[in-house]
Image (spheres, rainbow, N blue to C red):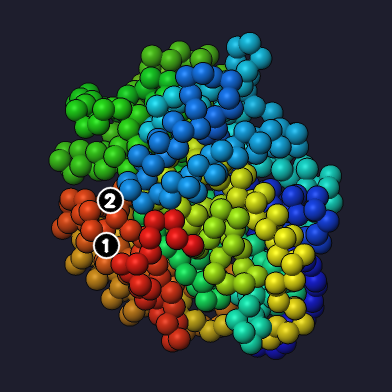
Amino acid sequence: MTSPCWKAHADLVVVGTGVAGLTAALRARELGLRVLVVTKEAAEGGNTRWAQGGVAVVLGDDSADSVDRHVADTLAAGGGLCDADTAARIIGDGPAAVARLRSRGAVFDMGDAGRLARTREGGHTAFRVVHAGGDATGAEVERALLAASRDGRVPMLEHHVAVDTLRTPAGEVAGLLVLDASGVPGVLTAPAVLLATGGLGQLYQATTNPSVATADGVAIALRSGAPVADLEFVQFHPTVLYTGEGARGRCPLVTEAVRGEGAVLVDSRGLRVMAGVHPLGDLAPRDVVSAAITRRLAELGEDHVFLDATHLDRPTFRRRFPTVLAACLAAGVDPSAAPIPVSPAAHFSCGGVVSTVDGRTPVRGLYAAGEVARTGLHGANRLASNSLLEGLVVGTRAAEAVAADLALGVLAEPRLAACQPVPTVPVADRDTLQRVMSRYAAIGRDGEGLAVVGSVLDVSAVDRPLETRALVEDAALTLTARALIAAAAARTESRGCHVRDDFPAVDPDWAHGLTIRLTPSGQPMLDRPALLARGAA
């Protein structure tokens, strides 16, 4: 590989154009930092736009709800692995974050008496989820942040994939190596790099995530020396529109808010799926609902159940859930006349790069925010609609942390960074990887199946230089899959999103996180597996 063909410099490079990345970029710009946003597609190509439900937030105008109650719901959903202080800080910052977003142009649905409309989703004990466009909250959040970024003249480098960080001899991050759409390399020098790359849904055949969700940030962080944690906790959304056997790629989401408005899950015989399973019934936390659906499907030998929302007439459904209605009608289903066929699909990574509520990772100069980060908010299972909240709050705090670290002079001097060639790393065939991950490392897992995944990846992976976007993405999926199965194999219990068929019970001895680092040879390994206290960063 030849030397990079071009260079650019900034105070902060943000990787990703989702809610966390754009929020961070806007706040950094307000603080006077030179910011550059990098995205491998167009700016509109992030994952945020697909978020339907809303933002979970306690605005203080409802005496029946409180921050403490929201925190309690979050901890209950998280299966004993959330950090209570982290949850309190992020949830407590929610009202200011939503107010800031509205000041940047976001328009939320209004209810009675001039208050924002609210709905309830799984795991919540109160109506606290604010939404936009009925079920198009993510699209509205993305629209407002992109418009504010363009008005604020935040520069964006589109159609450039992040390959690896630049690092000083001391291991500090001091920039980013990127490839353009033609594979031409370039260097972005900066004392701070914020990973806001989203999730890892493309590890699986069926997911709610778009094609860009290939775990790039997890791989970059690991190769930079940062630890990741809780990767075994992959949340499967229980109600994804079933479009036929063998559905692949991004599948249409049927927001949990449909159940919040009274819809119920039934099987092919018309029997309630959640009857007697959980006190909250159809609004139980997502891990509980997904597991219940999976068990019922296994009993019946079928591949989907039904979400019955026929109590909502067509005008009501269209007003409240226009996105869901359009997807259903495109699939030939009228949800006001017949139950919607649904099944679980990979949705959200509860784990990620170990970071604080201010986005700092253990590697100086490297920050993380959004789904790619593990702050301690989600634990073993994310509470519905806490993700947009986290992106708004931690994105803001990360920008402020970068500004503070720059002012204190604790970040590296970019001119000290070594300008290395693109890395050569193992790359597995994506189709093979997705098939074995979906078969052996999805909702139900066991030690034998996880060993099969490891063997298949070992046999199929070939060392390749990361000279194209496809190779960068497939390498990230390969490394992340290996890290995930290492953690899943080590956690010999069932907790939250992690369900082991061979260890079906919760084990109190496993009430702690698992961290993964790379060995000098580039292999994922458990790092002090029994010592990562809840919320440690």
Residue 174, placed above or below residue 434: below
Work out whether residue 263 or residue 522 is closer to the camera in this orientation and state it.
522
Res. 178 visible in picture: no
Q: Position of residue 166 (x, y in %)?
A: 66, 78
Label disc, if present, on residue 495 of the rendered structure: 2
Residue drawn at x 70%, y 65% is: 405
Mark 1 residue crowding within 10 angstroms, few (<14) / some (14–19) / many (20+): many
Work out whether residue 43 or residue 235 is closer to the camera in this orientation and state it.
235
Q: Position of residue 325 (x, y in %)?
A: 50, 27
Residue 420, placed above or below residue 379: below
Residue 489, placed above or below residue 287: below
Contact (Cβ within 8 Å) of mark 1 with mark 2: yes
| Image quadrant where one finds the N terminus | bottom right
Residue drawn at x 54%, y 69% is: 362
Residue drawn at x 45%, y 37% is: 71
Dot 2 falls on a residue whose secondary structure is loop
Residue 390, placed above or below residue 514: above
Dot 1 falls on a residue whose secondary structure is loop
Label disc, if present, on residue 491 of the rendered structure: 1
Label disc, if present, on residue 256 of the rendered structure: none
Image-quadrant location for residue 58: top right
Q: Is residue 438 left or right of residue 194?
A: left
Res. 480 visible in picture: yes
Q: CA distance from mark 1 to mark 2?
A: 9 Å
Check disc 2 and give the amino acid type.
Answer: Arg
Work out whether residue 157 or residue 382 is closer to the camera in this orientation and state it.
382
Residue drawn at x 15%, y 40% is: 299
Check disc 1 and give the amino acid type.
Answer: Arg
Mark 2 residue crowding within 10 angstroms, few (<14) / some (14–19) / many (20+): many
Q: Position of residue 493 (x, y in %)?
A: 22, 56
